[in-house]
Image: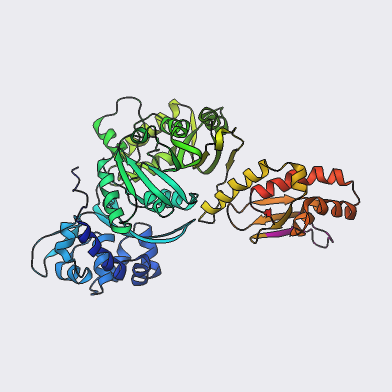
Amino acid sequence: MTSVPPPAGEPAAVAALRPALEASFTVDAVEDLLGDVASAALQRGQLLPARRVVAGSTDPRAALTALFLLGDEVPRSELDAALPGLGADGAARLGLVRAAGQQAGDPVRAVVDLQPYAATDATGPVAWWLASDLSEVVTGRRLAADHVLGTGGASTTLAQVTVRPEVGRVLDLGTGCGIQALHAARHAGAVVGTDISRRALAFARFNAALNMPDADLTLRHGSMLEPVAGERFDLVVSNPPFVITPRTGAPGAAVAEALGAFEYRDGGRSGDDLVRDLVTGVGAVLAPGGVAQMLVNWEHRRGEPWTDRVGAWLDESGLEAWVVERELLDPAEYAETWIRDGGTSSEREPDAWTAAYGAWVDDFAARDVEAVGFGLVTLRRPADGGRATLRRMEEHHGVLRQPLGGHLAASLAAHDWLEAHDDEALAATRLVVAADVTEERYLTPGAAHPNVVVVRQGDGFGRGVQASTGLAAFVGVCDGELSVGQTVGALAALLEVPSSDLAAELLPAVRGLVRDGFLAPA
């Protein structure tokens, strides 16, 4: 399948596009036009309700929605009105649309996707527009191998979970349409985006010109870390081509086409080898204290806990690490997800679907893969050449309260604080309870005292910690007035237990609560 040229244009023409989009084509403006039902259906890839809303409307929002979100033709006159100062001719010169003629009623059709985008990361809210290739929902065809993906669940999640301190240099490895680079440019002195796809780099260049024309953003072509070999970055973010695609055997042409070889998702490696190489190699470009965050897959193989498998990669990396598994799919679910993602339909192409499905399941079986995990890997190079002290590997398949980046940054800082404070120093510290912490009590009907007390976190991972009587009492009185040691002593007297025994019970738990943000130094 031949792809249309990516958008491009003179800065003045791109600048003329922005005010028109700001006036009529924001997330809020589209949702207000469509209403709740049609907006929700559109998010699910169902276009009919939105088409009924915009049909016959002369509202500029309707023309832009029909053109870019629904893939429908609109009359030239309506697009001219919706993009004042640019019009259909200007949009065509930018490579966004193709016009059939010069008459007012002649149809105009989008040749690339242009989506309004709104999100909140650890720096605050953003409102942009992101160009990418048209989706299979709009075209009704399989994706091209060089398809450039727009915003999806993974890219939005990565933007929300990224820590965002003010830093000097950021690397966006596998930049795609440039969304992570744009987020990074808000808190970094300079950003470098790399991608193996020249087409993706062209989209990223256009999106930067449209949304952040003054950003210090450099785009480089190449695979993985090759374009930045020998350089150092304070933050690396990556939503790499991590999808595990069958590489064994010699599938026929129909199967190979159904499996796909999409640049945005397939790294050309067997299993999760690409992810392993990235985890073990990214330290080479991290500055001391630098952080790398990536969303990736890893295989769960029979007889080998995933924590051992991924843990071996972490050992090889020599970096501090925090790995959170967010989702787990069995091999069949995984195959179904990515066959659909490539635009192959079991209804339209049952033979291709079945062949690709079988190839995927066989590939997993060859390596004894029982499931595939998806999650967030946060790596950090110890500052000043120190030893790695952070190693956390956990499963959290529940709902997160986004944006999570601020919580992750605070937890990393809390880990460092705890490393610098032994139990004696901790005992001399005054602590306060975080504002989002609540207490849950569970009682047997008629009982005077609770059977279970859970201290619950409202932010971050929403963790719940079952607390002993002593720990619940300790958290309840942490208002910054007394030190940890004084509080333990007072509770020991109240509970009529030796102070040393209570300290031995509470201090490890208190450290965990500080690490996870339940408690903080006053």
What residue is drawn where x is 36% and y is 44%?
192
Direction from residue 52 to residue 299 in the image, left or right: right
Left or right: where 106 falls relative to 8: left
Q: Is residue 440 magenta?
A: yes
The picture places residue 125, in percent across and down from the top left corner, at 44, 61
User: Predominant secondary structure in magenta?
Assistant: loop
In the rendered view, would you say 99 is above or below 375? below
Q: Is residue 56 above or below residue 485?
A: below
Is residue 382 inside the magenta stretch? no
* x 35%, y 26%: residue: 248
Colour convention = rainbow
Question: Residue at position x 54%, y 56% from top?
Answer: 401
Picture quadrant where residue 90 is located: bottom left
Residue 87 placement (x, y as % from top left): 17, 66
**Looking at the picture, how far across and down is residue 102, in whole percent?**
8, 65
Q: Position of residue 52 (x, y in %)?
A: 28, 69
Residue at the right extreme of this rendering:
496
> Where on the picture, by quarter, is residue 358?
top left
Up/down of 230 relative to 178, above or below: above
Determine if residue 442 is in view: no
Rendered position, 399 above or below 31:
above
Query: In this picture, which residue range is highlighted in magenta?
Result: 438-452
